[in-house]
């Protein structure tokens, strides 16, 4: 019993010592997370997509044929202008089996995370939300595009992987 306890303490100590180096190493998990929420105050469905900045800036640099980085303030306007068309071309939203046009509102950076804000007008709380996010699915091995939707306090979630198609959430 004491050996297991000592081993556990040693593993925890080793993990804590390596933690500062984790941010400096390249990551091998590729993911986006999209939160979808019905807003009864203004009859809209709000979407917030978040992802690591590196994948987005690499993709946009290739699209624009120019090396861009979120670390350079001069590049930010070009990156921001390119994000809207990219994201709206790679996502699809159906509310109650009807196509809903996603409007790009803007983006911001917090640390190394990019937050992308979108919305669509919708007259009533949706009974079903079907969402597809194909961003990076064909480019990055193991890409996982998670989605969570909330309507009137009820939460549903799913994952979009290469070859899986959209997530359907019913409320």
Image (spheres, rainbow, N blue to C red):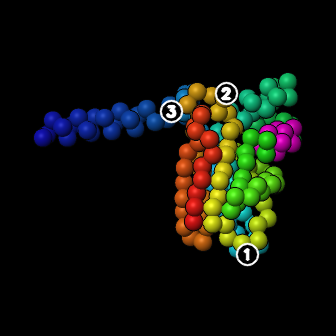
Residue 125 placement (x, y as % from top left): 67, 70
Q: Secondary structure at mark 3?
A: helix
Is mark 2 in CB contact (under 8 Å) with mark 3? no
User: Along the line of sight, which residue is nearer the eye, 88 or 97?
Assistant: 97
Q: Residue 72 sits in which quadrant?
A: top right
Residue tagged 2: 139
How would you rate the neighbour count of disc 1 (Cα within 10 Å): few for under 14, some for 14-19, many for 20 or more? few
Q: Secondary structure at mark 2?
A: loop
The answer to whether residue 67 is seen in the rendering is: yes
Q: Secondary structure at mark 1?
A: loop
Residue farthest along the front direction in this orientation: 97
| Label 2 environment density (alpha carbons within 10 Å; few <14, some 14–19, many ≥20) | few
47 on left or right of 1? right
User: Does the residue at mark 1 contact the one at mark 3 (Cβ under 8 Å)?
Assistant: no
User: Marks 2 and 3: which is nearer the front?
Assistant: 2
Which residue has dot 1 on it?
Answer: 41
Badge nearest the viewer, 1 or 3 = 1
Mark seen at residue 22: 3
Q: Is residue 74 left or right of residue 37?
A: right
Q: Which residues are magenta?
A: 78-87
In the foreground, 60 or 121? 121
Magenta: main secondary structure? helix
């Amino acid at each position: 019993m004491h050996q297991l306890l000592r081993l556990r303490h040693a593993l925890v100590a080793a993990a804590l010592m390596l933690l500062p180096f984790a941010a400096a190493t390249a990551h091998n998990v590729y993911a986006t997370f999209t939160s979808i929420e019905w807003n009864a105050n203004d009859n809209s469905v709000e979407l917030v997509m978040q992802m690591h900045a590196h994948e987005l800036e690499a993709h946009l640099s290739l699209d624009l044929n120019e090396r861009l980085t979120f670390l350079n303030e001069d590049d930010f306007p070009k990156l921001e202008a390119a994000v809207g068309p990219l994201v709206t071309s790679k996502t699809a939203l159906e509310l109650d089996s009807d196509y809903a046009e996603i409007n790009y509102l803007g983006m911001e950076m917090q640390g190394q995370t990019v937050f992308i804000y979108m919305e669509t007008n919708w007259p009533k709380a949706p009974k079903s939300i079907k969402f597809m996010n194909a961003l990076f699915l064909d480019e990055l091995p193991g890409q996982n595009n998670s989605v969570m939707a909330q309507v009137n306090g009820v939460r549903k979630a799913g994952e979009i992987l290469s070859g899986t198609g959209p997530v359907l959430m019913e409320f």
